Each structure stands twice: as structure tokens, then as C-alpha cells.
Image (tube, rainbow, N blue to C red):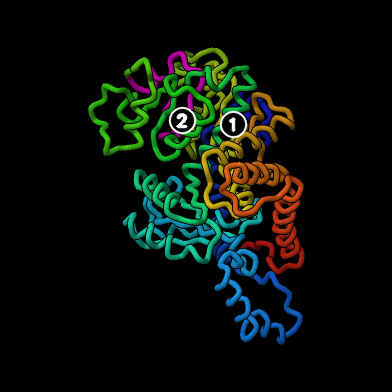
Amino acid sequence: MNYNEKGVTVDKKITKEELLARAIKPAQDSLKMHPFYRGKIEVVPKCAIRGIEDFAIWYTPGVAAACRAIKEKPDKAYSYTNKGNTIAIVTDGTRVLGLGDIGPVAAMPVMEGKSLLFKYLGGVDAFPICLDTKDPEEFIKTVKYITPSFGGINLEDIESPKCFYILERLRGEMTIPVWHDDQQGTAAVTLAGLINALKVVGKKIEDVKITMVGIGAANVRITKLIIKAGADPEKIIIVDSKGILNRKRDDIDKRQMEKYELCQITNKENREGGIEEAMVGQDVVIALSKSGPDTIQKSWVSKMADDAIVFACANPVPEIWPWDAKEAGARVVVTGRSDFPNQVNNSLVFPAVFRGTLDVMARTITDEMCIAAAYEVARFAEDKGIHEDYILPTMDEWEVFPREAIAVAKKAMEQKVARLSFSEKVLFDMAREKILRAREELAILMEKGIIPPYKEG
């Protein structure tokens, strides 16, 4: 069993050569198109300039009046400037995609790409801030220093375990929302997929037995979020590179805080062994670990419970090919790839989460706001009609983003972390207008040739 580019089941399996060609082409195009456009984002005016005399309003001397108004009431910065729609994407370049520690300069193309997604999908103005330090304290200090310019902070591609420390410190000490997409974004979209996968197979989150393969930043946060969403921690089994986490492991102590805490609350039966033993009888496996395709074996999937759910999310090659997992008995298979059905894609979450957060000027992004986002993504797909090969929306279903933004904003208001309060209709209109404006601006720039079409040579 296999799938074409649109997620439609076909009979022929993809050959290694076809997969290689498919994987290589975006990289080949990237090396041509990046230098052609010299990057992916730029600053353009958003105010009217009727004539040169308008600069007396937008700059000196008229701008002084706006400065004095903000000095008297600092929150006016959100209405007098673009602060309320501007976030920083901050990285140290220590864990960039699958490339590892490539440094802050080499991380720039990824951060610019993230900025592009924020704008196109969420109408959010995002700027890459690549820091030339690996010291977490220097990192934290620098983010605090730049706070006046931004309405939110998106942490990106920071190595584990310091990413946990940085996130928790900044969330606790900042007056603007701080989010780590590799943790919270991945967790929210995975929860969304799990919600609908369980509906497809007719199981409840509180009843299922779940195996987590890998215990990096993403899986740590996924585990915590699905527990908060109702999963029973005692029915969760986690596997790291040395085997199943259990209370007998003497190589995990309180210095490894995240892993140690999970050791104490998961795996009630104290199961031992590796991935194979961790999957026996389980309803769900969520893998974000070593690229496959043999990290998870077909025979291991066959030992799972009936109507098993497999998240094989390593890139570029999932821990097990979807057709192998299906042939072994899995009913729903999820990957991180866009050329298979059911892609777990952070881009479904982070633009809308920040859209909703910024629209109500929330002080933080809580776990409950992430869960609200996940449930709304799941509801959107359910409204379209979920089945084994469609449990999550795709990025081109743009209507999901304003709906998700509303859910996040409403939860922020409910939890009293929002500075502003609006009706659901106003929230929808605000989100929809900003998202459509970003898309329409780009369409006009391309139509007018201001952004030229790519040409070879």
C-alpha cells in the first residue's frame, strides 16, 4: 500500500530512487532560488505616504508626540507602533532541523523561512534574531534586552537540555509571551493528530496505552501535553537511546530533571527492554527519534493492540514506512512528510497560536492555550470528514488558522492572561483580515512583478 502526492492510496510502492529524487529536488531548487531572491523577507511600509511632507508626521518633528504618549502609557506602544504584531524568532543555531549545531549564521535561511510562514499563514510580522552565543544565561539576558521591540518571542532550534531551561526561565520572567516551537508547536499538532486518530479507531485518550520513542525536547513536551489533555501517565512507556524509562534505571537522576520526572510518573508496570518491548500491546506509538526506515520494525507494530496508531515523525525518512506499518496492522499512520497522508506539521499551529495571542495581547502562552489550539485543529479536520488518511488539515486549508486563533484568544481571556477582551466575531474578523491581507499583499507583489518570477540562469 502506498500514496501519491495528494494522499490518495495507490498500489505501487515508492522505490528508493524515487524517494531520493523527491528528496533532492527541493534542495536543488533551494540552492538556485535563495541567491536569486537574496533571502525571503524584507521590510515594507504599512502607512500611507501621500507626499514627502508626511515624513513630518511619521518622523521628526511629529513623531515626538507619539513618543511622549507611549512614555506616559507604555501599553500605547501596541497601538502606536507595530509592536503588537511583531515577534522575534530567536535561535543560537545549536539544533537546526536535522543539521545539528551549524551556528547562527547558517541558521538564517531557516529563520527567514519561519518568518515567511508566520506572515503568510498567520499575518504575523516575524524577524530572525540569530545569537552568537551558546551560553544559556547570555541567551536569556539578550532576549530580555530586546523585549521592548516585540510583542512575542518564538524560540527556535536550540539544543536540548538547555532549551527546557531557557523556555521556563523566559516564560516565568518575561511580560510578553514566549514559545518554543520545537516543544510546544510539535506537541500541539501531535495532540491534534492524536485526538482525531483516536476518533477514527473509536478509542478514548484516557484509556489508551501510549509508547513514546525518543525523549528529546519534542517528545518531552508532547508527553506532558497529552497527559494534561487526559492521557493516563501510568499507561505511557517512554524509550530513550538506552531503553525503557523505569524506576530501576540508575543512570537517570534529578540533574536530568525532565527525564527524571517522567520516570517517576510513567510506566506503572515498570516494563524493561527496548523499543520492541515498549510497543507490545500498546494502542499508540509516537516516535520522534532516529531517521528510519528500520528504527521501528514491522514485526514490532504487529505486536501492538488492534487498530493501532503509529506516529513515525522522523525526517527525512520516518522510523517506519507508512505502508509497512499498515501491512503490520496499524490502522492510522502519521509522518512528518508532506508527500504522505496525515503530516504532523508545526506550521498548522504556530502562526495561529501567535495570531490569537497577539490579538488579545496575552502575557504568556499557557499549556491550556496549546490544547485549545490542538482541539480546534482537530475539529476543523473533523468538520471536513476524518478517516484513516485524513486526520489533520493541510497548510493550504487556510480557514483553519483564524478558527484556531479564536480558540487560543478565548482561552487566554478565560485564563485572564489577556490584556484585551473581544467577542468571538470580532476575534474572527481581526484574524481573518490580517491573514488575508498578508496573502493578498504577496499576490499583488507577484502580479505586479515587484517580486519577479524565478528564472533559470
Picture quadrant where residue 296 is located:
top left
Residue that appears at 61% across and 85% down: 60
- Magenta region, mostly helix, strand or loop? loop
Picture quadrant where residue 45 is located:
bottom right
Residue that appears at 64% across and 22% down: 199
Start and end of the magenta stretch? 273-296
Q: Which residue is mark 2?
A: 287
Residue that appears at 44% across and 24% down: 233
Instruction: Tell me residue 376's x, y (percent).
Output: 65, 36
Q: Which residue is mark 1?
A: 193
Instruction: Tell me residue 413's x, y (percent).
Output: 62, 46
Residue 442 appearing in the image: yes
Q: Which of the two residues, 413 or 136, is positioned nearer the viewer here? A: 413
Residue that appears at 56% across and 24% down: 323
Tell me the amino acid under the disc marked 1: Gly
- Which quadrant is the C terminus positioned in? bottom right
Instruction: Tell me residue 369's x, y (percent).
Output: 57, 41
Q: Earlier in the sequence, mark 2 or mark 1?
A: 1
Number of residues whose C-alpha sits closer than 10 Å to that of mark 1, classed few (under 14), some (14–19) or many (20 or more): many
- Tag in front: 2 or 1: 1
- In the rendered image, the vertical position of residue 52 relative to residue 264, given as above or below: below
- Which quadrant is the N terminus positioned in? top right
Q: Which of the two residues, 335 or 349, is positioned nearer the viewer here? A: 349
Tell me the amino acid under the disc marked 2: Ala
- In the rendered image, the vertical position of residue 104 relative to residue 95, given as above or below: below
Residue 18 appearing in the image: no
Picture quadrant where residue 252 is located:
top left
